[in-house]
Image: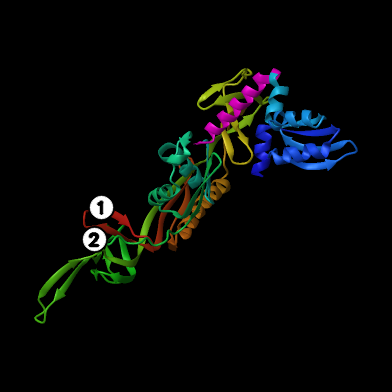
Amino acid sequence: MLLTILRYIFGYVKAEIYGFAPERFMNLIIKNDIVVWDIEGTEKGYIFYTGRRNLMLMKPFLQKTNMKIKILEKYGLPYFLRQNKRRAGFLIGFLFFCLMVYILSLFVWEVKVTGENKLVADNLLRVIEEEYVPLGTLKAKINCSELETALRKQYDEISWISCELKGTGLTVYLEEGMAPKMQKDSDVTGDMVAAKDAQIIKMITRQGTPVVKVKDTVKKGDILISGTIYIYDDNNEIMETSHIAADGDVYGVTTEGYEDYVDIAYYEKEYQGTPKTHITFYFLDYCLTPYIPKIDAENFDSYTQIHKAKILDNFYLPFGYKTVKRTPYQLKKAEYSDKEAKKILEERLQKKLQDFEQKGVEIIENNVTIEKSNGRMTAKGTIVKNEPIAILQSSSGKHKEKKD
């Protein structure tokens, strides 16, 4: 393979020799280390391939043996450039384009986040682009492991995350749910304290001294498991005190207030006329819109679809175009029926309860009632839950949530 590339770079030819002594000519060039290959015999002499520079070396032997040479084909970069010298501008432009593509390939021009919850994924995408990897960041400056660690610390709902650099794109894969237990820092000491008011229904102490017991009622900030361990002597007097990071699982019954409403009267959009579409070209943060069609409406919805330029699947470029579609509408007053408004509130409440259950929280009672008053349907009440309530309060005073 390497030999083929070198032959193309320096150029080679397919030649035919004929005349008085073809065998003697072949013996002379081989004796003088002139390389030829793919030799074929003919009625008049031989056909073979040889390097472009070997043609000059063969000239004395052609005269000595009274032979003639005919060039049948020419191959390689030198001949290509000679044939296309009138297209020098095109070749220079092509080389400049290749250089620009190479330079652009050193940066990140696309960030994607995949996740089950679109709201979490969209929020994470915004944070990554604003705080960690703005578009146009050098790929050499991005450490995927450090980015994964930083995002895990910032988002407790992420249980698994992986970052991949491919082409000019950064893809973040994540799963949501209960986060895995984190390894403890041996230098950290502190107590497990209550994150909220609760009545304890289950308690498992793995490390430390329990301060409360099941059925006790605790307030937010109360110590549940102490990180201070006392060692007593035979006289039941404190002989030694040591400090550790308390560890355990504490579950409690908590009560959370809930309130939501839906206005009976509302405005809905009544679309009118034909949507207007225009195109905007962009390069980095610069945009150019050749023409924007006039729209005779005060209110309109605008939908923008971005088309990024890319080479293959993962080689994104910092330019492209946007298709903007504007649809005019008028606001029309409407009203929900009592049944419709109640259904909306019930669906929102069920979504809230499902979110709790996905996080490992058990719903004990749902005391939310829905009533109509003052032109709106209101859902109000309390939700009683069984959930983990312990967090680690380090000895420095900082709070760290305990990971279950």
Nearer to the camera, 104 or 91: 91
Instruction: Find disc 2 in the rendering and name its residue.
Output: 190
Tag 1 or tag 2, which sits nearer the N-term? 2
Along the horizontal axis of the image, is 284 left or right of 270?
A: left
Coloration mode: rainbow
Q: For mark 1, does the 10 Å Cα neighbourhood hold few (<14), some (14 to 19), or many (20 or more) residues?
A: few
Magenta residues, dominant SS class: helix
Residue furthest toward the bottom?
Answer: 234
As drawn, 294 above or below 178:
above
In which quadrant will I find the N terminus?
top right
In which quadrant will I find the C terminus?
bottom left
Disc on res. 398: 1
Q: For mark 2, does the 10 Å Cα neighbourhood hold few (<14), some (14 to 19), or many (20 or more) residues?
A: many
180 in the magenta segment: no
At a point 79% along the width and 31% down the height, the residue shown is 73
Residue furthest toward the front?
Answer: 64
Along the horizontal axis of the image, is 270 left or right of 364?
A: right
Amino acid at pointer 2:
Gly
At a point 77% along the width and 30% down the height, the residue shown is 64
Please state the horizontal and vertical placement of residue 38, each as a whole percent of the image: 78, 43
Disc on res. 134: none
Please state the horizontal and vertical placement of residue 399, each as a whole percent of the image: 28, 54
Which stretch did the figure color magenta? 86-107
The answer to whether residue 250 is visible is yes
Amino acid at pointer 1:
Lys
The answer to whether residue 330 is visible is no
SS category of the residue bearing label 2? strand
Please state the horizontal and vertical placement of residue 48, each as a whole percent of the image: 79, 38
Distance from the alpha carbon under mark 2 to that under mark 1: 9 Å
Please state the horizontal and vertical placement of residue 305, each as a whole percent of the image: 61, 32
SS category of the residue bearing label 1? loop
